[in-house]
Every structure is written in C-alpha cells, then in structure tokens.
Image (cartoon, helix red, strand yellow):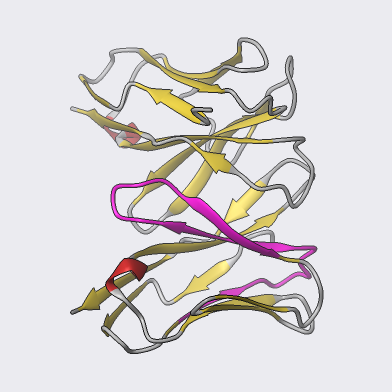
Amino acid sequence: GQQVMQIPQYQHVQEGEDFTTYCNSSTTLSNIQWYKQRPGGHPVFLIQLVKSGEVKKQKRLTFQFGEAKKNSSLHITATQTTDVGTYFCGRYSSASKIIFGSGTRLSIRP
Amino acid sequence: NAGVTQTPKFQVLKTGQSMTLQCAQDMNHNSMYWYRQDPGMGLRLIYYSASEGTTDKGEVPNGYNVSRLNKREFSLRLESAAPSQTSVYFCASTLGGGSGETQYFGPGTRLLVL
C-alpha cells in the first residue's frame, strides 16, 4: 500500500542517449523526492515535487509529477558519464518516515 | 560542517559477534535514521528517531537496537550478528522530521558478517 515501485531496475545506455526512470504508487502522494547515489557513495538529494503536474528542470534533468500525484519520472537528456549511479525516488509515508523505491541503476557506455 | 559522519567505514564480524555503528550530525537536526542497503532492495528503514528521546521501528528492525544518545548522536547495535545482516548501513538526518524534508546521508558503513 505504501510502497513505491520504481522501474526499470537497470538501464545501460550509450553516452549521449536519453534515460528515464519511473516511480509509481497505488495511492496518492503528498510529495515525492529524488536522490542520486554515485557508485560507492551515499544518496544525495536532487529535488522534491509537491504539486500535481509539476515539472522541474535541473540542467539536463527533468522531473515530473503526475496529474493524479501517483507517479513521477526523472528524465536525463543526452547522458554523460557523470550521470552514472543509482537514482531513487522516495515518498513520506508519515510525518517522519520516507519510503524509498528500489532504485534504477544507470550505467553508460562511453 | 562535517554533516553526517559514520564510524566505522568497514567492518568484518563473525556470526554471533556484537558491534555498534556510530552516527553523528553537526547540523542541529532533530530527526535521525538508520537504513540498510542491499542489492536490488533499495534503502530500507531500520529505526528512526523523530526527536531526541524517542525512537521508533522502521521496516526491518529485527536483530537491531538503537540509542539516541543526545541530539547529535544515534547509534545502531547488532547484538548477535548474522550473515543476513551483511549490508551497507546508512545513517541520515532531517532538520525537523516533517513530511517532505530533505534527508542528509552519511558516507555509510560496509558490514560483512561471516
């Protein structure tokens, strides 16, 4: 009920190709957060989406929150080797607890 | 500011041994968390402390205990380690513990239980 499903689990792309990861929930989300974890590193906050239909951009990264607030996506345009890592979405299940998706691991062929 | 720090960085234990993972934050945050990360499983919450003096179970608390020593420090104890507890452990903190707050993670502790 409170889980967030994240797909795909892995994505291997040629450098310069686009990449998208999706986060889906069966229940309405009050907000959704995205984090990036570099190989061997720790998760680092990227962005939070709150409003229905919200779209935010960070350089080549585009984050969307669905109209029904049940899904979200992260799209990277023209991937670079610096984009390698695992991308997690997370939702707050209560005031203090965040539940993370299982992550999408992105690898890139130079 | 160091942010969130964790010790040790690496640890190898034998089955049945005990150990305590230490976490400290210098951001004056109220809430602190312990996660474990296993391949394909994402980040799973073990325990959290919404404020000093309180602790609550997360998704996977069995086999662990925690202590919120003061506002800065939150430790995780394995009383009798098992191979299933081989994982990477992350500590995190948030300013107020409210919904939608940014989680700040420590560098992690890599634990191998033989």
* B35 over B70 or under it: above or below: below
Residue A89 occupies which quadrant of the picture? bottom right
Quarter containing the C terminus of chain B: top left
Q: Is residue B62 visible?
A: no
Q: Nearer the viewer, residue A25 or B95?
A: B95
Q: Is residue B42 visible?
A: yes
Whether residue A24 is in magenta: the answer is yes
Q: Residue B21 at what x, y percent from top left? A: 41, 20
Side of B61 relative to A12 (left or right): right
Residue displayed at 73% across by 29% down: B50
Q: Is residue A19 left or right of residue B73?
A: left
Per the rendered image, the range of residues in magenta is: A20-48
| Total labels drawn | 0
Res A33 quadrant in image: bottom right
- For the point 53% across and 28% down, the residue is B1
Q: In this picture, is A5 found above or below B3?
A: below
Question: Is B108 a magenta residue?
Answer: no
Q: Position of residue A92 (x, y in %)?
A: 71, 53
Q: Residue at x 60, y 65 (%)?
A: A4
Residue extending farthest to the bottom is A17
Q: Residue at x 75, y 37 (%)?
A: B97
Residue A71, compared with residue B60, is above or below; it is below
Query: Residue B90, how many percent across, how many down?
Result: 45, 36
Q: Is residue A16 left or right of residue A75?
A: left
Residue nearest the viewer, comparing B39 with B91: B91
Q: Position of residue B51 (x, y in %)?
A: 75, 24
